[in-house]
Amino acid sequence: MKIILTGSTGYVGSKVLEQCLLHHEVSSIIALSRRDLNIADPKLRVIIVHDFAQYSPEVLSEIDGADACIYCLGTNVPVRPPELNRTINFDYAIGTAKIFAAAFMENKSRGKFNFVYLSGALPEKDQNKTLWFLADNRRMRGQLENALLQLGQETKNSGFEVYIARPGFVQPEGAVLLNWIVGKLSNAIMLHHLAACLLQLAIDGHSDPIAENNILNAMGKLVIDGQGTSG
Ligand SMILES: NC(=O)c1ccc[n+]([C@@H]2O[C@H](COP(=O)([O-])OP(=O)(O)OC[C@H]3O[C@@H](n4cnc5c(N)ncnc54)[C@H](OP(=O)(O)O)[C@@H]3O)[C@@H](O)[C@H]2O)c1
């Protein structure tokens, strides 16, 4: 299958890329990035994109025939000013999803497309809920989840499906004791488990469009153990 990946230079996205390159079901990865990855692999093609809210016909023709997108672009902390934060963490994601949905609908012969968005545990979908920290950013990212879910509802019957992964703290591999303590104390997931989940959602989808951290943990462990992938 052909997978589109954004955020492939980042902490989570680079692990997803690593697993995509190793996965036998993934024949082609199109990384949309604002800078080169400096990775030479016959499965990988890097396309430089500067505005993730619009795509040129040339870029759309490169991604034609893709089966899924794993969207890992985003910032962990709000960027300033707020308008730029919204551009990166809202407009880019919903813009990409809508453009890919429209491109998919034009060519329904493809059958199915899974759009997997990497969110987090903190975004708040209830826009009226009182929040005590990072309120504006969490509401904005919750608003994004609502918009993505609505798009998924509208396109589901056509084969374009939207999935949202909501991991908690993403723990690095290594540092075994620290990871064990953090894992016991907080809503956390290991990086290679999360990457395996995102890939699994892209390949097979899921019964629920939202995958919370506990579901991701279970799915990640199953996929890694089942396939013997060490990530
Ligand atoms: N890390 C965690 O513990 C965690 C937990 C839950 C949710 N998340 C969410 O997961 C997403 C990715 O997190 P991460 O830890 O992988 O972040 P990261 O390491 O900072 O990577 C961010 C990725 O997004 C790209 N990006 C950022 N700003 C961009 C812009 N203006 N234009 C184009 N590309 C841009 C970066 O590209 P460049 O390399 O070119 O900058 C990079 O590929 C975020 O939305 C974050 O909120 C992360």
Image: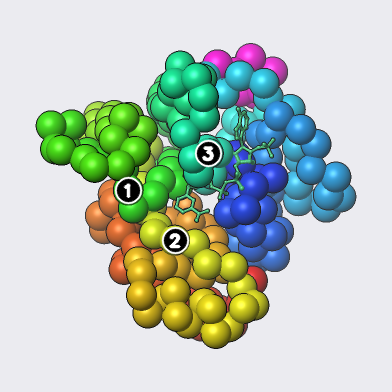
Q: x, y percentage for residue 98?
A: 41, 24
Q: Secondary structure at mark 1?
A: loop
Residue extent of the magenta highlight: 54-61
Query: Between 53 and 114, which is closer to the camera in this rendering?
Result: 53
Answer yes or no: do the residues labelled 3 and 2 have beta carbons within 8 Å? no
Q: Quadrant of ligand 1?
A: top right
Give the vertical position of 208 relative to 143 (above or below): below
Q: CA distance from mark 1 to mark 2?
A: 10 Å
Q: x, y percentage for residue 192?
A: 57, 68
In terms of sequence position, does the residue under pointer 1 or pointer 2 come before the other?
Answer: 1
Measuring 36% from the left and 69% from the top, which residue is drawn there? Answer: 186
The residue pinned by badge 2 equals 169
Whether the residue under disc 1 has CB within 8 Å of ligand 1:
yes
Q: How is the rendered protein coloured?
A: rainbow
Give, as a three-letter code, the residue at label 3. Thr
Q: Which of the image's four quarters has the C terminus?
A: bottom right
Give the prevailing secondary structure in the magenta stretch. Answer: helix
Answer yes or no: do the residues labelled 1 and 3 have beta carbons within 8 Å? no
Q: CA distance from mark 3 to mark 2?
A: 14 Å
Whether the residue under disc 3 has CB within 8 Å of ligand 1:
yes
The residue pinned by badge 1 equals 122
Whether the residue under disc 2 has CB within 8 Å of ligand 1:
yes
Q: x, y percentage for residue 75?
A: 53, 39
In terms of sequence position, does the residue under pointer 1 or pointer 3 come before the other?
Answer: 3
Measuring 76% from the left and 33% from the top, which residue is drawn there? Answer: 35
| Classed neighbour count for the residue bearing mark 2: other residues with Cα under 10 Å, few (<14), some (14–19), many (≥20) | some
Q: Is residue 15 magenta?
A: no
Q: Quadrant of residue 51?
A: top right
Q: Is residue 39 visible?
A: yes
